[in-house]
Amino acid sequence: MKITDGLHVITHQVVKPTLTTKPESVNHLFIADCSGSMYGLIDQVVADVKAKLRTLKKGDSVSLAWFSGKGEYRWVLKGFKIAGDFGPVDTALDDFRARGLTCFSEVLTEAVAVVDDLKGFKGPFALCFLTDGYPTVSPAEKEAAATIAALRSLGKHVASSLFVGYGPYYNKATLTQMAAEVGGTVIHAQKFQDFPPEYGLFMERSRTAVPMAELNIDVDSGEVLAIVTVDGGAVSTHTFEKLRTGISVKVPENVKEVVLITTSPGKRESKVVGEVGDRFLYAAALVLSQQARADLALEVLGHLRDKMAIDLLANAFTNAEYGTAEHVILGAVRDEKKRRIGGPAPKKYLPKKNAFCLLDLVDALVDDPDAAFLPKHDAFDYRRIGPPTKVRDGYPKFVPLSDDIRTPFADLTFHDSILNLSVRTKIDGHIVLPDSVPADRSKAESKDNTIKRPSTLGPQHATFQWRNYALVRGGARNLDSIPVVLGKPSFAACVVEGLIPKGTTFFPGNVYVLDLTKLPVMNRAMAETCATDPGDVARLVVDELFAEGELKAAKARFEKAFPKAGRTFDKRTPEETAFLAACGIRPDGSYGPPVDEGATTDYFMAPSLELKVKGCSSLPSVADVEKNIAAGKPLTFAQAFVANGLYLIDTVSPFNAAGFEGYIDSVKRDLKVTRRKLQRTKFAVLLGKRWFDGWISREGCKATHPNVFAPGAKSFKVAKQLDAEVSFVLGEEKVEF
């Protein structure tokens, strides 16, 4: 079937005897990721696997293994025959505990040995591999090669296989490649609750599994993109070897049709219509999506005119979003009733590029003065994004003033290079001050090293803490829902977009729980418009430096002109200041005791984009800049941004504290706008897989913003450069948790 001139879906009829006997028993291999990121989930994994294994038939065998980091794996059960007593199975599964990092190759290599030990067992082998991450072993190339080698050996024995990517951070491309090596099926499970039903279906299918057989297919010239089989609603991909006269592929012996996705038509291309034709096309769309060829998958779905599937896939950028779309497509493979739900799409249909997304919602909430979120609300199910921390022993416990904390969305924070978006929150509360504290905690406790609480300080001291809550981590949505209060316009927008049920009445101050699972992180319009001209991006980077330099200069001049403004400790006696500092109270009145960071339980590699300005890795102190200006010395490029800020402040000359604070707030607002624009560009590049106009290569990319200081440099001299050279560095960054 022709989809476009360069995309064809061909069904190849297999002419060979069909097996009529079904295996009496199945040998199940279950391998589960027990890396640190599975902490809090592994008990549920164990409980569900225990329940599912009880559905196995007498005579089946089960082998169980867990894995985490390098050298950390164990086959806890090998070839246990099901006979009614599941005690040994339960005992073995109880060994599944979250620990370490992630290594695939070792447990899969051992799986080959397990299968070899069980070669006397009757029936086929069925493999289930579950992971929420990807290999964190160095060197990565060696680990990948070892994993593929193990799977190729397993492929000689495994008749059916299921690879489950759980959560937002697994390596989708790696898992798809692994599945293809053994003719397996890949599924996404955003929540663990999505997995058990799929595992149950897989166990049922494994009962009809048959050995793999080599098949030679004669094809015309052109590239074969994928080879697919459909069996009982399971879509499997297969690796193949290119031959002089065609290709060789291993497929199950009972397969009657093999689906080829190619760039050229077959020798006898004809239109396959009806349910069979649709099933093959949906299977082709699924595989193309899994292989990161969403543009081709959309061509197939456009041919099928399935509006829901097109809408979901067109605005998919993260694993979770692709997983949702692929779940709908897989449902259409399995069930004719799940195709074209709501009616067919118009011909050549594509959804609106500017579909409402999470970044649009954040912008709406930032612009709504009445909007706030509630981090202590029962409906706020937050996922920690870093290693665990614990307040160091000896410091007081912070007690929040109330659980009804409502914080505005005005204070957003972004990561410099990876796609982290957080809300900075002020939480009011108190600590109970001890009667005495060590003056120097590095020294042994003694009378000479003890500070008694001044009589002017009561036992309870009001303070506050800063907390960052991530809405997006590593480009993926970090929350499924968020409790908020809203203004009327943003409430109406949330109802229209389906985040709040229709018919809900608006009340000022009422708490509404927004369902964020309905939103893509970004939309195609952002991907197509934000990352365009590298010169425009370079200009934004320079604007950010100007604003940072101006803000730094303004704060320094403000502190110099009004040294007591906004500084809590300036209102304290020296004795009170020393005691509070020893208790962890900062000069601004916030509580910030030292913390001990817990061990890293796992990590993933997040895509990153660094925008580096030559000669400006960081801005210097205002004092150093003022010293050079007074001496008439030329300034470095980085110093010039601070000098420009001083020049602007001297021009404005705010003479009172209120005027100065208003000036600083204005600079902060400008800085926030610039940073939001830069972050959208990074989202477009890293999630939208978009690069900058005119650049083919991803390496050595630079853009210049000329004569940066030409207008305002009359009051100071720049030593070497007036042009800003911005490097665009694409890479990956380790995110630990």
Image (cartoon, rainbow, N blue to C red):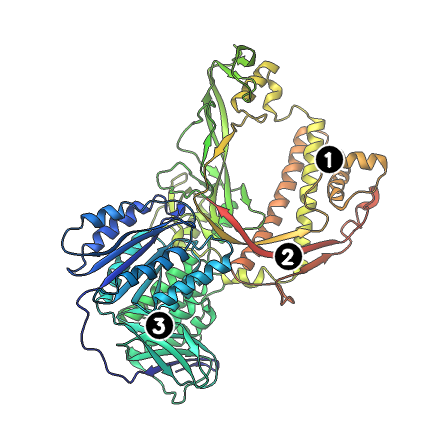
Report, in whole angstroms, how far the alpha carbon at label 2 lies from the one at label 1: 28 Å
Residue 283's disc number: 3
Most foreground residue, 64 or 410: 64
Can you give x and y, in whole percent of width and height, for residue 4 in the image? 46, 80
Q: Residues within 10 Å of mark 2 (few under 14, many from 20)?
A: many
Residue drawn at (48%, 32%) of the image: 596
Can you give x and y, in whole percent of width and height, for residue 662 in the image? 65, 35
| Disc 2 to disc 1: CB gap under 8 Å | no
Looking at the rendered structure, the secondary structure element under dot 3 is helix
Q: Residues within 10 Å of mark 1 (few under 14, many from 20)?
A: many
Residue drawn at (41%, 29%) of the image: 402
Residue 694 relative to residue 604: left or right: right
Can you give x and y, in whole percent of width and height, for residue 88 in the image? 20, 49
Can you give x and y, in whole percent of width and height, for residue 406 in the image? 44, 36
Q: Quadrant of the N terminus?
A: bottom left
Residue type highlighted by circle 3: Ala
Most foreground residue, 86 or 590: 86
Residue at image mark 2: 728
Residue type highlighted by circle 1: Val
Of badges 1 and 3, nearer the viewer stands 3
Report, in whole angstroms, how far the alpha carbon at label 1 lies from the one at label 3: 62 Å
Q: Is residue 94 above or below residue 8?
A: above
Q: Which comes before the other along the chain, label 2 or label 3?
A: 3
Of badges 2 and 1, nearer the viewer stands 2
Looking at the rendered structure, the secondary structure element under dot 1 is helix
Q: In the current view of this chain or complex, which residue is farthest to the bottom?
A: 268
Most foreground residue, 276 or 145: 145
